[in-house]
Image (cartoon, helix red, strand yellow):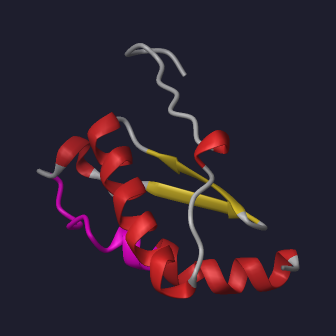
Amino acid sequence: MSPLLANIALDGMIRDTQEIFPNQKNYIQGYKPKIISVSDDFVVIHRELEVILQCKKAIQEWLKPVGLELQEDKDENLSYPPGRG
């Protein structure tokens, strides 16, 4: 798939995943997760690992009907101690 087509196709996935989280200050850490995509790669950014894992599950569910899946060998969860990163 070309990078342009991948970005167009995955735009709906990004919007749908972010909409799971209410836009309220009292939600976990007060903001929605950020999802950045380049071609068929993307990264989910949030302060809470729980939110990132919820996004991963939502993304997996979004990809199923279109015949795509996450590649577990490319999947990585990173975190930084508070005050760093």
Position of 76 with respect to 4 (left or right) is left
* Quarter of the rendering occupied by the N terminus: bottom right
For residue 24, which quarter of the picture?
bottom left
Q: What stretch is highlighted in magenta?
A: 15-25
> Is residue 9 depicted above or below 54 in this figure?
below
* Most foreground residue, 49 or 64: 64
* Most foreground residue, 84 or 54: 54
* Quarter of the rendering occupied by the C terminus: top right
Residue at point 35% right, 58% down?
57
Question: Is residue 60 visible in this depiction of the protein?
Answer: yes
Residue at point 17% right, 54% down?
25
For residue 82, which quarter of the picture?
top left
Residue 5 image position (x, y, % from top left): 79, 85
Position of 85 with respect to 23 (left or right) is right
Residue 31 image position (x, y, % from top left): 31, 53
* Most foreground residue, 41 or 72: 72
For residue 47, which quarter of the picture?
top left
Residue 4 image position (x, y, % from top left): 83, 81
> Is residue 61 depicted above or below 35 in this figure?
below
Within the magenta stretch, is there residue 19?
yes
Residue at point 47% right, 86% down?
65
Within the magenta stretch, is there residue 66?
no
